[in-house]
């Protein structure tokens, strides 16, 4: 099962990707986490990406495509994957199409979590993250439920950085949906409500035993 989990920053992609990973036993490939790991390790890629992310901008396509190419060639991705945070531009989507062809594979479903701008700003400017496992939590949470680590706010999760990230998403990444709509693999899912409610919609879109549904799951 090869899935692309698509949506604006703050739409809940990470939470739903963790659910899908546990349920179907396929790796969650989160480009944001990959980049933050490079920054924390102080690698050349991390040093290049850090000021770009701090300004709320996207890392150039060639860097992102190289990261994804390396990741999909790892053995644990051989039985399927969930990509979260990529592609964010049409050229990235086209490059992913080429890469999937090289691997003799194809995307099974694009799951699009739809959330309005006002709610995205509220979610992002207040959310907290576990520095150990990168799980995100709403304001008021003090420790990670998985490992007990004290939560912190990411450097790029503040109003000044959040708004440009969403504006860039609206102008550059929404066209990616149109790129995939022509293939009939997009499911639009209402990203509002409780985690359990959203999870139910995601699983309905996938269907039992991976029999995918192409309808929208919006009110």
Image: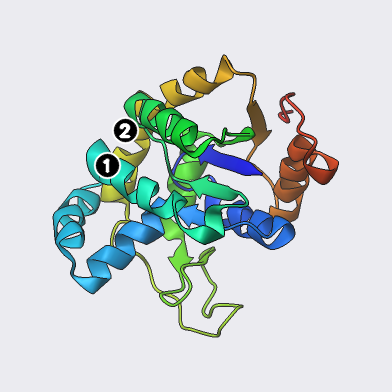
Q: Residue at x 66, y 29 (%)?
A: 187
| Residue 147 to residue 185: above or below | below
- Please indicate, yes or no, whether residue 83 appears anywhere in the rendered image: yes
Quadrant placement of the N terminus: top right
Q: Is residue 12 visible?
A: no
**62 lies above or below 40:** above
Instruction: Identify the mark nearer the N-term, 1 or 2.
Output: 1
Foreground residue among 150 and 186: 186
> Would you name the residue on which mark 2 appears?
168
Q: Is residue 155 above or below residue 119?
A: below
> Is 67 or 155 nearer to us in this picture?
67
Q: Which mark's residue is nearer the viewer, 1 or 2?
A: 1
Question: Is the C-beta separation of discs 1 and 2 under 8 Å?
Answer: yes
Q: Position of residue 142 (x, y in %)?
A: 51, 79
The residue wearing badge 1 is 58
Q: Residues within 10 Å of mark 2 (few under 14, many from 20)?
A: some
Where in the figure is residue 67, as x and y percent of width and height?
A: 33, 50
Report the side of 211 relative to 12 (left or right). Answer: right
Coloring basis for residues: rainbow
The alpha-carbon separation of the residues under discs 1 and 2 comes to 8 Å
Q: Residue at x 57, y 49 (%)?
A: 82
Label 1 secondary element? loop
Q: Nearer the viewer, residue 63 or 56?
A: 63
Residue drawn where x is 63% and y is 56% of the image:
26
Q: Quadrant of the C terminus?
A: top right
Give neighbour class at mark 1: few <14, some 14-19, many 20+ (Cα, 10 Å): some
Secondary element type, mark 2: helix
Where residue 92 sits, quadrant-wise, is top left
Residue at the right extreme, as displayed: 208
Q: Where's residue 190, x and y in %?
A: 66, 35
């Amino acid at each position: 099962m090869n899935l692309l989990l698509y949506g604006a920053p703050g739409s809940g992609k990470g939470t739903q990707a963790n659910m899908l990973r546990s349920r179907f036993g396929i790796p969650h490939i989160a480009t944001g986490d990959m980049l933050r790991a490079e920054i924390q390790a102080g690698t050349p890629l991390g040093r290049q990406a850090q000021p770009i992310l701090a300004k709320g901008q996207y890392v150039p396509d060639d860097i992102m495509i190289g990261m994804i190419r390396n990741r999909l060639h790892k053995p644990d991705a051989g039985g399927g994957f969930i990509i979260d945070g990529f592609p964010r531009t049409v050229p990235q989507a086209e490059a992913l199409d080429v890469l999937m062809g090289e691997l003799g594979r194809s995307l099974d479903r694009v799951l699009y979590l739809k959330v309005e701008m006002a709610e995205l700003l509220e979610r992002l400017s207040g959310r907290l993250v576990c520095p150990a496992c990168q799980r995100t939590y709403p304001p008021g949470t003090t420790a990670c439920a998985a490992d007990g680590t004290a939560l912190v706010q990411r450097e790029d999760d503040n109003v000044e950085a959040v708004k440009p990230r969403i504006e860039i998403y609206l102008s550059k990444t929404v066209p990616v949906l149109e790129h995939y709509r022509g293939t009939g693999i997009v499911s639009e899912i209402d990203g509002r409500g409780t985690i359990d409610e959203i999870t139910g919609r995601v699983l309905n879109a996938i269907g039992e035993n991976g029999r995918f549904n192409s309808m929208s799951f919006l009110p």
